[in-house]
Amino acid sequence: MTKEGNSENRAPASFYTIGHSTHPLEDFIALLRHYGVTMVADIRAFPYSRRNRDYDGARLLPELAAQGIGYAHIPPLGGRRPRSKTVPPEVNAFWRVQSFHNYADHALGEDFHGGLETLIDMGRQATVAIMCAEILWWRCHRRIVTDYLLADGLKVLHILSMTDATPAGLTPAAVVAAGPSITYPLPSARQRDTGDES
């Protein structure tokens, strides 16, 4: 695993991802500042937290603004999607956890791609951290958003701590087509994903 905690040696990234988890807000902001983040893109389905109200979007926006960091909620990239009525189940059968399967189906639609374009536009003007609640990126739908950014030729790092920002890699089962459009067919039973639900 590559770790990029030293700001002097850290290569610039187009995007970071981060989960706020139960971090005290001051620690979360310290992480953002450490990695030079100037914009937080909130991709939670609902921009609030039952565990820590400091992460409610309405509270988070002014707190980040006071530190010179922007904030925007991008609803089309939010998780918690229902089962698709139009995408055949085998198209994204790699995902064992239904929430990931549902999100991969959602990502094939126009709504998702509109949100993705908004995100990419942000990245042209700022150093963006894509934020959700789950601290572990592999248990969060931001791993699928990351696949789309990687397929578009962009660099992404997953922030876990002050000393650990792991360069992202494309999900092994991902099949990238023009657009980009990504599907996750089932290569074989033994390669089926074991991710936990975000």
Image (tube, rainbow, N blue to C red):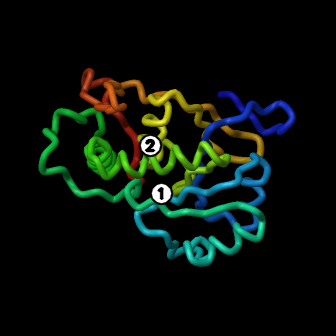
Measured Cα–Cα span from mark 2 to mark 1: 9 Å
Residue 196 position within the rendered picture, expressed as x and y whole percent measured from the top left? 40, 47
* Quadrant assignment for the N terminus: top right
Residue at the far right: name it. Answer: 8
Q: Are marks 2 and 1 in contact (CB under 8 Å)?
A: yes
Q: Nearer the viewer, residue 39 or 125?
A: 125
What is the three-letter code of the residue carrying label 1?
Ile
Residue picked out by circle 2: 145
Residue 187 position within the rendered picture, expressed as x and y whole percent measured from the top left? 27, 21
Mark 1 element type: loop
Q: Against 155, is 72 above or below?
A: below
Q: Nearer the viewer, residue 35 or 123?
A: 123
Residue 195 position within the rendered picture, expressed as x and y whole percent measured from the top left? 40, 41
Q: Nearer the viewer, residue 83 or 123?
A: 123
Q: Quadrant of residue 190?
A: top left
**Residue 30 vs residue 173: left or right?**
right
Q: Residue at x 25, y 27 (%)?
A: 186
Q: Quadrant of residue 11?
A: top right
Q: How many marks do you count on the picture?
A: 2
**Residue 21 vs residue 77: left or right?**
right
Q: Residue at x 83, y 39 (%)?
A: 7
Residue picked out by circle 1: 43
What is the three-letter code of the residue carrying label 2?
Val
Mark 2 element type: helix
Q: Quadrant of residue 156?
A: top right
Residue 111 position within the rendered picture, expressed as x and y whole percent measured from the top left? 31, 52
How many residues crowd mark 1 within 10 Å: few (<14), some (14–19), many (20+)?
many
How many residues crowd mark 2 within 10 Å: few (<14), some (14–19), many (20+)?
many
